[in-house]
Amino acid sequence: MKQIKISLIAILTVILISPACRNSIDGITITGQVDSINGTKVRLTNYDNTVVYDSTIVRNNQFKFNSTVPEKGFYYVDFKSNIPYRNGKFTLGGWMHPCKLYLEKNGKYFFQANGKDQILYNYYTIKSTSPTQQKLEEYNSGINLERKKLLAKKREYLQLADIFLQQGNDEKYKKYLDSSSIIETKERLIYKTSTYEYIQNNPSTLITPYLITKMPDFFENYSLYKSVLDGLDPEVKETEYAKKAYTFLKSVEKLRIGGDVPQIYGSDIHGKPFNYDYSKKKYTLIDLWASWCLPCRYQTPQLKTIYQKYKTKGFDIIAVSVDKDKEWWIKISKYDSIPWYNVSESVKTKDSKNIENFVASRLPLNFLVNEHKKIIRRDVELDDLDKFLEDSLQKHKN
């Protein structure tokens, strides 16, 4: 079964850094023009959605904040309605979507969206006096422009496919259907390709190292990110965003195949601190996950099958949760009946040593470790894991 990857920062969008400035900033004005969502609650929150600095209601298609925040940096304006929606196994009380802003002292921001869908699919616009926010908007606008071009082309191909289907022309029908599939592939890659282009062409803004910390492919594109970071303007290199990106790259160097597994921090659901002896098992899978990560939880039944099959033959699993909400992590762990070692730091994302040490910028993420605490595989698919264990543990038994 192929693992579905989710960016740790794209679903709930939490950032792995803390802003550089530690002084409270004021004079921030955020106004919004949003159509068709009157009665919706709007909040100004921190990047973990754990602190609300201001809130209001959309009335007459408008909202406004005059706010103070602890420090300059990235924050969210998010929207929540009373219309319930389904998310996996649970029904949630309304939809919520966070929209990113970079707030600076005396900054003026104007948010505009034509309806809920433009908010949900990030087609909103933010005009601002903040130079950093302007660079962020430039990046977002570039992605949206490419997305719109691809969607228009896909619609054109699908319309042509329908025409030839009605005419009974199977050859041309399949041709245009295949063309639309190619567009869909490009559409899925637009975030990565647009980000690669942007970071290579913008060495003088902190948006570049900020974007690098969000990327899910540190291992695959280590050389690209190191080259970009080394080429940043001197003042940008001194930002917390650049320092955090460099920290990630250093962790990637340590997480090489054949390297030692990093220290795992946290306690189990009973409060017992992590203490594990790798030498007692031939292989241990370290599985990084979160209670809110549906792809992580979807793979739990297959992991249980593998665990039951090999747990007496020298195989074990350590689940490392990156949840910051301890109660919710415990609740979901019990709901999913996780039978293996399950630990969590239960701290804010920016304070997590596990996220930093394992470069957990996407979930699920796993590492297969041997009895000598050496990493032998990374991001192993569960079908491949099953076959590897069957071959290796059988040979070891013999």
Image (cartoon, helix red, strand yellow):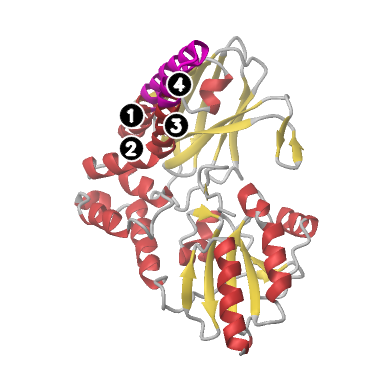
Residue located at (51% from left, 27% from top): 121
- In this view, the mark in front (3 or 2): 3
Residue located at (51% from left, 82% from top): 373
Given contact means CB atoms under 8 Å apart, are the residues at marks 2 and 1 in contact? yes
- Bounds of the magenta segment: 147-175
- In this view, the mark in front (3 or 4): 4
**Viewport quadrant of the N terminus:** bottom right
| Helix, strand or loop under label 2 | helix
Left or right of 164, for residue 306: right
The amino acid type found where label 2 is placed reads Ser
Examine the structure image and report whether residue 330 is included in the region drawn in magenta.
Answer: no
Q: In the rendered view, would you say 240 is above or below 167? A: below
Given contact means CB atoms under 8 Å apart, are the residues at marks 3 and 2 in contact? no
Q: Nearer the viewer, residue 122 or 345?
A: 122
| Helix, strand or loop under label 1 | helix
Which residue position is annotated with label 1?
A: 142
Which residue position is annotated with label 3?
A: 181
Which residue position is annotated with label 2?
A: 194
Q: In the rendered view, would you say 237 is above or below 105? A: below
The amino acid type found where label 3 is placed reads Ser
Q: Label 1 to label 4, Cα distance in Å? A: 32 Å
Q: Label 3 to label 4, Cα distance in Å? A: 13 Å
